[in-house]
Amino acid sequence: MHSIPQLYQRIADTFSQEKFLFEPTELYEPIEYALSQGGKRLRPLLVLMSCDLFGGEIGEAMKPSIGVELFHNFTLLHDDIMDQAAIRRGKPAVHKKWNANVAILSGDTMFVMAYDYISKVRPEYLPQVIDLFNDTARKVCEGQQYDMNFETRTDVSIGEYLMMIRLKTAVLLACSMKLGAILAGAGEEDTENIYLFGENLGMAFQLQDDLLDVFGDTEKFGKEIGGDIVTNKKTYLYLKAFELAQGDTLVRLSSLFAGHDIDPHTKVEQIKEIYSALGIRKYTSGYINEYLEKAQVYLEKISLEREKKEALRNLALELVNREV
Amino acid sequence: MHSIPQLYQRIADTFSQEKFLFEPTELYEPIEYALSQGGKRLRPLLVLMSCDLFGGEIGEAMKPSIGVELFHNFTLLHDDIMDQAAIRRGKPAVHKKWNANVAILSGDTMFVMAYDYISKVRPEYLPQVIDLFNDTARKVCEGQQYDMNFETRTDVSIGEYLMMIRLKTAVLLACSMKLGAILAGAGEEDTENIYLFGENLGMAFQLQDDLLDVFGDTEKFGKEIGGDIVTNKKTYLYLKAFELAQGDTLVRLSSLFAGHDIDPHTKVEQIKEIYSALGIRKYTSGYINEYLEKAQVYLEKISLEREKKEALRNLALELVNREV
């Protein structure tokens, strides 16, 4: 079995060896730019780890793992247009560095490239791989639509929010793990259980991301703290706070989120105070742990030696216990 | 063998039976709207005709043929944003009826649905089908990029224009025919030759479209005449006119295309006069015939009875001799 640093090295090597720049350069330069900004490469890592755990050849999973990362980056290109997000990984987003048309068409091309890389599997695995990927891509689009719908709705429930992050984020992590298992020739039950492990891990991961956005350390988190608060994003923290707040606290919370002329820094600080008073951090951590426990249930069902499963469990904990 | 009206009926029936509306409706309603505007359904027809000619079961080609039409409609959704085209098939384009974000995300979803429908083939055909489709989709994106690049360039050659329409339009017709042949179990040489037949037919088809845009009959053509002239699109007609025009004619042509405050109707009429004087219609028809002859060469190489090939040849002539 390979260590996580070894797998990361393989991913980095493959990315540097693959060619992403073709003619016309106007189409491919933004793709190269987006891919050169790095990112965690978490999804390829999950593909390779899962393949490795089930005894597969990670060489056979390299191209499909890159396909998943291309897909993820394609969604970022298009989401950043829709969300009017100017910065991605500390650099201008593609639609800002170039323009929206470039981000649309280079994004579309990345999407095709994603399918191309994902299809580089043994023919006997292709039907299952394509079905999995089609299903996942469709869900990710639906998740983004719900995310946009929620921006203008005032009655979003916690259940709806969880459904949205499941579609938008968790299923792609689940897909990555299942893909690795398929390519290793794992049985149907195991591939389904690793999918559900990945899905619950993905839920924990996104909730942790929401928590870090409010309570994280700017340097370690890699982006500005409080972004979700400034944009009034209806995260679990926001929804839970409105569920719990009463009387004066509710009035203050509402007026802080409704206020247009409030200084963003002040807004973040004051809302953090309310969140702390309401115990939002504890509630969120509790939820994260629930998802981790669910993930653990599926992990236990998988027919691998305990020791190998331990590696997955450690990865899960490591991913979620990112510096808060 | 099925007649063209029979095949069209099958396509219409399938479209009306398939479900395209799911939750969230905000995502799928624009897809249903785009598909309900009709269009020629030329690409599914080519898939089915080709499958039928090679003795395949057209029932097995129905879903993939719909996949190609979904892909085509996805490109229209995104192209209309990029080209700022307000009207599509006589109705508001999706990005106008809703907005650009809707057209981006519903377009992406149509793209996934296209892959989903195209993948509904026997497992033994899937690798070839996916490779063909990935290659085609990539080329279509590249063609759209060249098309946009040419808008701001003043030195576009006829050769470059032909390369652009080959990528943007012809390869999808070629892909449709090859797809039908693959699904009918045709041999490698035949599938390659029907691809090249379709590609050359596609070139003739696009050049005919350019010709109709200038010299067609508004009612029969289904869109306003002279659109390419009004938007200064560098079509074959435009490029050939600049190649041939000299002296005063060249000066007039340049000033008509450069003029910003000229009435569009006057611009179209005056440029049509110059095109006529330069014999542009004859040159374009000559080029169209050259492509039809090339298509014929590939058709002859195909191992089908003469009678069946005659049906394809007639379709080709019918497609291109659309009412000019």
Image (cartoon, coloured by chain):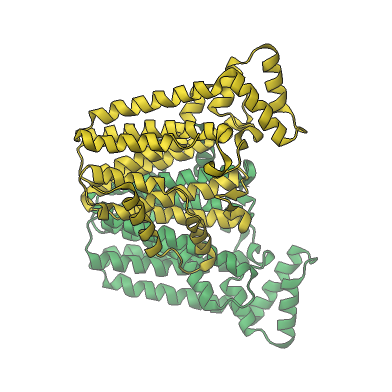
Chain colours: A green, B yellow
The one nearer the camera, A112 or B165, is B165
- Identify whether A280 is placed above or below B45: below
Position of A87 with respect to B210 (left or right) is: right
- Identify whether A75 is placed above or below B169: below
Q: Residue furthest top?
A: B247
Image coordinates of residue B171 in percent, x first then y, are: 40, 36
The one nearer the camera, B137 or A115, is B137
Instruction: Determine the residue positioned at 40% across, 23% down.
Output: B290
Kindly indicate the quadrant of the structure image that contains residue B173.
top left
Kindly indicate the quadrant of the structure image that contains residue B314.
top left
- Identify whether B7 is placed above or below B152: below
Position of B261 with respect to A36 (left or right) is: right
Instruction: Determine the residue positioned at 49% across, 43% down.
Output: A35
Q: Residue furthest bottom?
A: A247
Position of A15 with respect to A300 (left or right) is: right
- Identify whether B301 is placed above or below B139: above
- Res. A164 visible in picture: yes
Image coordinates of residue B10 in percent, x first then y, are: 33, 56
Image coordinates of residue B293 in percent, x first then y, are: 35, 25
Kindly indicate the quadrant of the structure image that contains residue A133.
bottom left
Instruction: Determine the residue positioned at 31% across, 28% down.
Output: B296
The one nearer the camera, B318 or B48, is B318
Instruction: Determine the residue positioned at 72% across, 32% down.
Output: B266
